[in-house]
Amino acid sequence: MTSAPGPRIPPPATGQAVVTPSGLVVGTVGSPSTTSEVTVDIVEEATATTLLGDLVTLTHQLDAGRFLLALGTVADIETRNRWHEDLNMRGVVKLHGRLPHLSGVGDTRTAKVVVQAVYETDTAEPPFASPPQESSGALGMSPSTGVPVRRVDDDIIGALVARHRSEVVYLGHVYRTGVQLPLWVRDFAGNQTDGAFHVGVFGRNGSGKTALAVYWLAAQMRHSSLGVLAFDPQGQFASQNGFPFDLQEWAQSLGRQVRVLSIAEDLRLPAWATTLTELLDGARFFHQLTIRATQNREAAVAEFVRLLQDASGWDEQQPDDLLRALLTSLMGDEAALTRIYNSKGPRDRVIDTIGRILGSSGAFEQLASIFRPVHNVFAPQNLTGRRRVKLMSLIHDVLDGQGGGQPAPYVIIDLSAQSGLTWLDDPETKARLIKDTASHLRRMSEDRWHATRRPINCCVVFDEAHRFASSRPAGEQTGLLAASLTEYVRTTRKYGLGWMFITQEVSALASGIYTQLRIRAFGYGLTTGSDLNRLTDEVGRGPALELYKSFPDPRAVTRKSYPFMLTGPVSPLSFTSAPTFLEVHTDVADFVAANQHLFTGISVPRVP
């Protein structure tokens, strides 16, 4: 019985140019060719098209009824004309600019095709009697010269991935074509494989990395048991400014509860005395007590932690009452003051300062204006009286879902200072909060995995990763956070806890994190310095790297285009380390139309 090659993928929307018809013969196998790199002699009809970056197929017959169908990327094209290479003819070209009847007419073009997947089939081309079987990442025998080389079309792609039709998603097209590129976008508890992998999305401003990340998450949300938690340092996921479509609306249409919670206004941190005191230190609280030197402030932090731990239920107390009690206790504790300052002079200065603050309403108000908002993130209600959501309860909801078979929630933790609390804008403050939250997330994931031996199935999105998972931390807390994240990325995938890092520079991401990312997406602009070095380590010096370097700046072209080079186990069309080249959708309607087999009855979300 003949197997259908799969439904026809809708053509791209207006503005997504299709350069030439697909499925046509563009050349024949030339010489020399190997099992992994094929020379293609381009036919005359194809010279009026663009081929660089296209996927093509060629077939090598093994015996009666058995074929190897190789899929590869056109990575380099060269024009040769032996008359123009003749030294005598170059003189004519110098005078006349071209050679009549020889220039153009005598041109020969050859392309290099890098093989990335080989299938065993029962016919040379679709339709196949049975779905193709994945064979290898290279041909078992170098191909014969003269074999036709065809540009792939959606029918060929559909036939090749027929076995995986219910699993693949389409986030865009094969670079510079209108052919949809099938991708794996799995969760962390899938039965088909050992689950999803950590993901890194890299690219300069304007490269489309946010668009790719949003489409990826939208596709991943089809796995209803997958919880999604986004750390949002700048508030972009909360506001969705610059998003290609409303991801929150999309999540809701899939039955997910969407919760956007601000640290400043909505979340209640557990009563961590150390965290409160460190946040006070970051807000320059101890500077107001004339404790300024780093060593002395560290001692003061330790004393405040001790005093808080002795104050039962401090998170429930009124901030002004708690502050007065803490200052009074510290002022009367000679041993504590001695541990902060050995010298009598500085100790007396601190005592006088505290006494002045306690005795003056104006001085107390100045210090309390720092203490209240910091204390409030641990309190039951925010400063306007609205009840806060306990952080530990929120993490529990993300890891365990909504219950009753309902889809897991999509949660955004907004760390931006939208409420006007400028102390939240300090990177060290944000790093402290993220570090403590991520620590409890990791611990709860590990506990659940040990208790159930089942993956908890959660994806953590980390925006602005170059700030907080940096290879060159700007401060102590950002350094501690980067070290913690490096450990978590190495250990949490087996628990079903995965990570997506979005950042502008490859080199800015901590190397320990980068090496654990199995799927990497490289957008425009990573072509200099250490970024280029990492790319070279990734794909080598060859046609693939040169194709990546040819990406246009999306802001410099009229037609919006977001090209990416993808590496890792990201597509059923690549079995090797060879990258695939994706052009991300620029219209969400195209995304919905291309993935109707996964999202039936879902309407097109609005654009923010």
Image (tube, helix red, strand yellow):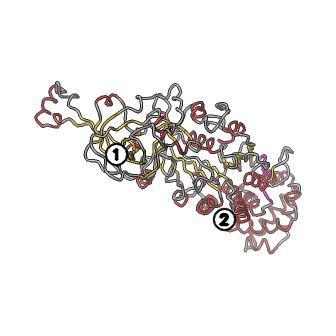
To which quarter of the image does residue 272 belong?
A: bottom right
Decide if residue 581 is on the left or right side of residue 501.
left
- At mark 2, the secondary structure is helix
Element at label 1: strand
Left or right of 93 in this view: 407: right
Residue type (three-letter) at the residue carrying disc 2: Thr
- Residue 170: x percent and y percent? 55, 39
Amino acid type for the residue under numbered disc 1 = His
Residue 545 visible, this angle? no
Query: What is the magenta range?
Result: 265-270
Above or below — where is 608 with respect to 115? above
Q: Residue at x 59, y 36 (%)?
A: 595
Residue 60: mark in rendering: 1
Q: CA distance from mark 2 to mark 1?
A: 71 Å
Q: Residue furthest left?
A: 88
The disc, 2 or 1, on the residue closer to the chain's N-terminal end is 1
Q: Please report the residue visible at 79 percent of the width from the left and 48 percent of the height from the top.
A: 404
Q: Of tags 2 and 1, which is closer to the observer?
A: 1
Q: Residues within 10 Å of mark 2 (few under 14, many from 20)?
A: few
Q: What residue is disc 2 on?
A: 294
Q: Is residue 361 left or right of residue 244?
A: right
* Relative image position of residue 192 (x, y in whole percent): 59, 52
